[in-house]
Amino acid sequence: MSDMARRGFVTGGTWCVDRNRVVEFWPGEDGLVEILEEQARGGGSACNLALGIRRLDAGMPVETIGVVGDDENGRLLHAAAAAHGIDATGLTVVAGAPTQFTDAYTSRRSGRRTHIFRAGAADALTPDHFDFAATSGRILHLGLPGIHARMDGAWGDAANGWVATLRKARRAGLLTNLELCSVPAERLAALVRPCLPELDLLVVNDVEIGAIAGMATCDHGETDTAACLRAARAVLASGAMRLVAVHFPRGAIAVARDGTVAAKASVRVPEAEIAGANGAGDAFASGFLYGFHEGWETARALALAHAAAAVSLRSIGTTDAIETWQDCLDIACRWGWREELTGLG
């Protein structure tokens, strides 16, 4: 089956429970701060992309693969998948270990996020959990390197379990994308570089593309757009990707194999609409991969990616505020867009 004859998404890897909490500010050690708001929701790359895609388009087939514990959190995640119409046949229950969870704190004062996690059952995930024989999905969205012990280690003749899983997916006819998280740059590069020959797409942020390329892409918290473009081109040249997309607060760029560059500024989100940034990167990936799946021009896919990320900011959860793709674009157009990106010559 050719990739164009396929339809839908397979999400694989991290399913965890996010214990989302809002505090006035993040305290130093020995400090004290009150929790102002909290909720428990599904989180992790496989969960967030699956739920995000279904919220963008309730008719899009989505199936998922991962591991959870035999506990209340595991049942919460299975219930979330069922409520969104996700095929969770591949969401395996592991006895004797707790479901992975993350305490996800958002500072109301700065808008910054701090994540503290326990891997639990997630450390049991291996390439053997991934069976693509029966799927007719088109795109595998896999993550997160750095927080799954057995996947992070060598697997057979593969540098790590991520490489082995991506190879398996491509042999089954799927296109592949890899989601990353905030592990130290050297660790991220060591895990991801061996994966590049097995990827068809790579959607990352400004810090992550710099880590993979071994280049500085941010200066004192400010994104260097031209440096991101150089890093994206370098990473593209060292892998098999059709396209590399890089997002950052002011916008995003995408570089195709033929050298074509697309750029789109982000949405000018009203300050009063922002509740938290947790999951905004996953929402961006949901919008971009949905547009790619549907054959949109890259610039339009970037616009939807920004729109999905923007509307997701209205909730402290990762996916609660995402709406249909049409409504996301309508809201983004109503709020307006930032100034177009420059310095990409």
Image: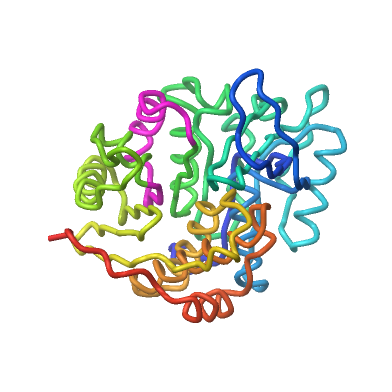
Q: Is residue 29 above or below residue 60?
A: above
Q: Is residue 182 above or below residue 277?
A: above
Left or right: residue 104 compared with residue 287 = right
* Of residues 37 and 316, the one drawn nearer to the viewer in this rendering: 37
| Residue depicted at 34% across the width and 55% down the height | 245
| Residue depicted at 65% across the width and 42% down the height | 24
Q: Quadrant of the C terminus?
A: bottom left
| Residue 44, percent from left and from top | 62, 43
The residues colored magenta run 182-205
Any magenta on residue 331? Answer: no
| Residue 122, percent from left and from top | 66, 30
Left or right: residue 170 compared with residue 274 = left
Left or right: residue 141 compared with residue 226 = right
| Residue 168, percent from left and from top | 49, 41
| Residue depicted at 44% across the width and 54% down the height | 175
Left or right: residue 54 compared with residue 305 = right
* Of residues 209 and 10, the one drawn nearer to the viewer in this rendering: 209
* Of residues 300 and 317, the one drawn nearer to the viewer in this rendering: 317
Any magenta on residue 192? Answer: yes
The answer to which quarter of the image holds residue 23 is top right
| Residue depicted at 50% across the width and 52% down the height | 281
